[in-house]
Amino acid sequence: MTSIEQLFAEYHQSLLRMLYRRTGDRDRAEDIAQEVFARAVAAPPDNPRPWLFAVALNLVRDDGRRAVRQGRRLQLLKAETDHPAPSPDHELERREMAARVERALATLREIDREVLLLKAEGFDYEEIAATTGLARTAIGTTIARARRRLVEACRAEEKDRHAAS
Amino acid sequence: MPHLDEGQLHALLDGELTPTERAEAEAHLASCAACRAAQAEAVEFLAEADKLIGAIEVPPAEGRRQMLPKTRVHTMRWTRLAWAATVVLAVGLGWFASSARQARAPVGATDLAETPVTAPAASTMADSQLRAKAAPAPAAEAAPMKEEKRAAPMVARERAEPLAADEPAQPAAPLAQAPAEQDRPAPAAKAAESTGLAAGNVGAASQDALQRSYAPAPAPAARIAAQAASTLRPVPMEEAVRILGGSIRLVDGMTPLRVLAGTLMLDSGTSGVGVRVVYDDPPGRELWLDQVRPDATGNEAPESRGEATTLLPGDTVAIPMNHGARGLRWLDQSGFRLGLTGFLPADSLRALARRVQ
């Protein structure tokens, strides 16, 4: 069985990246990633990658529901994490682009978003099916729709931005 | 063959079709302009979607704790904690030595002088704080103790310099399974008899030994600190169970690294003889579960008694600590004071606390 250290070394960065893309909040992403690995300690998974990402996505959904009730926790973390830094123009542009994509992602259906983010982490269709619970045969259609909707949402926002400026 | 749908086109581009499916799809594309156009559009969507998602990068973790400390960082963290522990210990012991000469107060802790020096290298801030307060403080002297703790750290640090904080930890005592039948804490009197650790059970001889042990003149400060560090000593699981009166709480699904026993402080001002079970968290840092049975608490500083007594079963109090550590304190249904401390986010600590059984 893979040790927890190996799991952490192998999957933590990828998991954190997926979680950050999903939540747009690094601290929340880190907290959830930590919780995922804490659970992996308690119940070491046989098929770790789909297991870790499935638990993470479940926690994101749960965390979203709990977040409103846990203002105190968020406040506590905020004190630790506020570190604004002036950004050069290209960094600002990159952030704006990232924010646009996050907004576009937010318009997608949950399952579309998850499938896209898992694919971006190198998951094959089999693993995406195992992680999300979708049928293997439905992955192609879901991912095609998700890609199209993401691109269209971004294009629409870009168009609105140009129209407004 | 009918036209390829969008899902098939993306599956083809993603390399997810079987060889047969792929051959069929490519054959169809060779003869169908509409599907080739759809494929070109799919290529565009795929590339653009990947690019868009790739634009969201995880920002650097400036100003936040490291998620996975490397071994060196790990060692440095504990080294710093060990140093900090010696500082506070030296101060606390200085106070104790002076107060012990003045008053024969009832002793409410373990017989430290008789305990072998087996201090683990991974002493913690929590250890140091509780050890600084472990000495029995009569109510009238509680305030002077606090003042001295604040006033003396620089002196204490100088004295503590010779201590080798990187000393390898003593091997943990062999762990044994807690007897399954021992679910209930034993009555206080019986537990006190069997362990000799309960408050008020240390006799005059032990007090003398304490005074000898902590007299500053004959012993260098470093040695004094090292002796005090032995307040928490490795014990076999059976002894830990006995100290707790017949039952021990463990984090379900985690394997204890070692079990320590001694005086613990679980909320400010309240200490008691209890057990610390030390674990490794996923990133390899230590976390520890402290537990003190209901009848083993004492040494409450007067100003904090209110806080200690307002903790009700089911309450959980989160306590931010130094060096990025966090602590959770709660009272379980049996009245045991429990504390889980580590370098995990509060949510993770809470999740682990829910597994304490």
Image (cartoon, coloured by chain):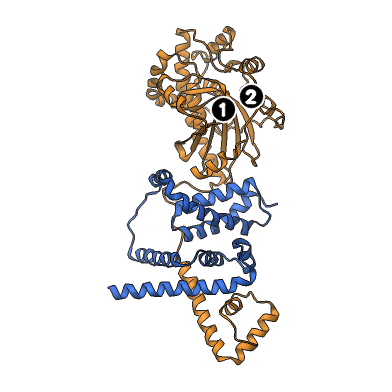
Chain colours: A blue, B orange
The residue tagged 2 is B185
* Residue A118 placement: quadrant: bottom right
The residue tagged 1 is B336
Q: Amino acid at mark 1?
A: Phe
First along the sequence among labels 1 and 2 = 2
Q: Chain of mark 2?
A: B
Query: x, y (%) of residue B55?
Result: 44, 67
Residue at x 67% of width, y 57% of height: A47
Does label 2 lie on the same chain as label 1? yes
Q: Is residue B20 placed above or below B193 in the rendered structure?
A: below
Query: x, y (%) of residue B346?
Result: 49, 42
Residue at x 41% of width, y 43% of height: A72
Within-10-Å neighbours for mark 2: few <14, some 14–19, many 20+: many
Q: Is residue B36 placed above or below B357 in the rendered structure?
A: below
Q: CA distance from mark 1 to mark 2?
A: 9 Å
Residue B297 left/right relative to A68: right
Q: Are marks 1 and 2 in contact (CB under 8 Å)?
A: yes
Residue at x 57% of width, y 35% of height: B288
Residue at x 52% of width, y 13% of height: B218
Along the viewing direction, whichever of B310 and A80 lies nearer the viewer:
B310
Residue A82 left/right relative to B94: left
Q: Is residue B326 placed above or below B236 in the rendered structure?
A: below
Look at the image and tell me whether residue B345 can be seen. no
Query: x, y (%) of residue B208?
Result: 55, 8
Query: x, y (%) of residue B214?
Result: 52, 15
Q: Amino acid at mark 2?
A: Pro
Identify the secondary structure beneath mark 2: loop
Along the viewing direction, whichever of A16 and B247 lies nearer the viewer:
B247
* Residue B59 placement: quadrant: bottom left
Within-10-Å neighbours for mark 1: few <14, some 14–19, many 20+: many
